[in-house]
Image (cartoon, rainbow, N blue to C red):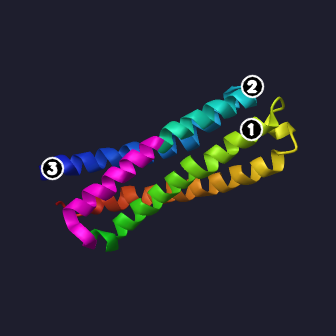
Amino acid sequence: MKNFLRYLDSLAVTAWVGGLWAIGYLAVPMLFYAQPDKQLAGMLAGQMFVALGYVGIMCGGYLLLQRWFTSGNTALREPLFLVVATMLAISLLIQFGIQPLMVELKAQALPLDVMHSTLAERFKMWHGVSSILYLVESLLGAVLVIRSSRAPSR
């Protein structure tokens, strides 16, 4: 059972962090490069980020619960637990705080594209905040990958 949980941990880290890197730094930039309709590219990118947000919430939730069931309250002081908890908090903030706000700004701008409306500056600000948080989550993901590969076997 210990090996199964270690493998499941590795798969969760891989899905979450790999998704962050693949979507945020490969797929979305390529989408904006290849798609001439930037509004469509933004809509598709948003859908990818929403799907990835749910992957992060599931993987982060699993990793925290699994570690807590394994180590009890001492897990709360483990560096990797804190990394995962911070990543999960960022995922939740983006998914349920910033993304809905950006969707609302787009809806308020209709029939215009939000970037061609009076709401463009607010949208850019929230997009920037989201991008910075995404970068922090991605960097913490790198820490998680590196530290997880060195973590002792359970």
Q: Is residue 7 left or right of residue 122?
A: left
Residue matched to label 3: 3
> Mark 1 or mark 3, which is nearer the start of the sequence?
3
Q: Main secondary structure of the magenta part?
A: helix
On whether residue 61 falls in the magenta region, the answer is: yes
- Which span is picked out in magenta? 54-74
Residue 106 marker:
1
Image coordinates for residue 79, horizontal then vertical, percent = 36, 70
Secondary structure found at label 1: helix
Quadrant of res 35: top right
Q: Residue at x 41, y 64 (%)?
A: 83
The amino acid type of the residue labelled 1 equals Lys
Amino acid marked by disc 2: Pro
How far apart are the alpha carbons under marks 3 and 1?
A: 47 Å
Q: Is residue 139 above or below residue 43?
A: below
Task: Determine the image quadrant of residue 114.
Answer: top right
Residue type of the residue flagged with mark 3: Asn
Residue at the spot 31% in from the left edge and 44% down from the top edge: 11
Where disc 2 sits, the SS reads loop
Q: Nearer the viewer, residue 143 or 111?
A: 111
Give the Cα separation between the discs numbered 3 and 2: 48 Å
Residue 9, x across and y down, in percent: 28, 50
For mark 2, what is the residue? 36
* 41 over 154 or under it: above or below: above
